[in-house]
Image (cartoon, rainbow, N blue to C red):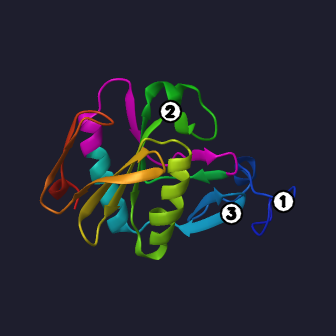
Amino acid sequence: MTNPARPGRGGAWTLNDLQDLPEDDQVYEIFDGSLLVSPHADVFHGAVANRLRRVLDRQAPAGVLVGQDIGVSARRSSYFVPDLFVATESAMASGGAALDPADVLLVVEVISPNNAGRDLVLKRHEYAAAGIPRYWLVEPRKQTLTVLVNGAGGYREEALVPAGEVYRTEQPFPLALPLADIF
């Protein structure tokens, strides 16, 4: 087994190195060749993510898949596992260890207090650099949804949806999202 302190071959971590790590209660990601380790989400975090997935699943059109627990190769030396993603159905047929960011229409992170900086700064930058068109930040404590759209210079805020409101959009597909349904 690979030594958790460094990859088996020495040097930068790669997606292949993750295959040798134990299946435990950790989430393993890679940023610029460095291993990032986080505990799995708590129950409340998981409930919010699963409720959001149900809402998205009900409204997703044919050819679009809403998923969890599959990583995205953000760049050659970075790999992240978003809480939720929306991708083309054809991307899933190609197989592989991670989704290609060109096939990902939306990534969603539910903000956890213990690693908020990773979602708010690091992943925001990396997902934008990879060309993923939309990034949603779900904040359970504030009960808000921040919608980011990728453009020149990275993500810009398109909407900040407070508790009790309904977010309506045409991207990544026509959708009405009552925030009360996820919090």
Q: In which quadrant will I find the C terminus?
A: bottom left
* Amino acid beneath label 1: Gly
Neighbor class of circle 1 (other Cα within 10 Å; few <14, some 14-19, many 20+) is: few
In the rendered structure, which segment of residues is drawn in magenta?
55-77
Q: Distance between the residues labelled 2 and 3?
A: 24 Å
* Amino acid beneath label 3: Leu
Q: Nearer the viewer, residue 179 or 58?
A: 179
Which mark is on residue 40?
none
Which mark is on residue 11?
1
Neighbor class of circle 3 (other Cα within 10 Å; few <14, some 14-19, many 20+) is: many
The structure residue drawn at horizontal position 84% and vertical position 59%, both measured from the top left corner, is: 11
- Residue 29 in picture, x, y percent from top left: 61, 58
Q: Which of 29 and 21 is in front in this view?
A: 29
The structure residue drawn at horizontal position 28% and vertical position 41%, both measured from the top left corner, is: 56
Look at the numbered disc 3 and give the secondary structure of its residue.
strand
Q: In which quadrant will I find the N terminus?
A: bottom right
- Is residue 97 shown left or right of residue 150? right
Q: Name the residue under label 2.
A: 103
Would you say the residues marked 3 and 1 are in contact, meaning their CB atoms lie under 8 Å apart? no
Which mark is on residue 35?
3
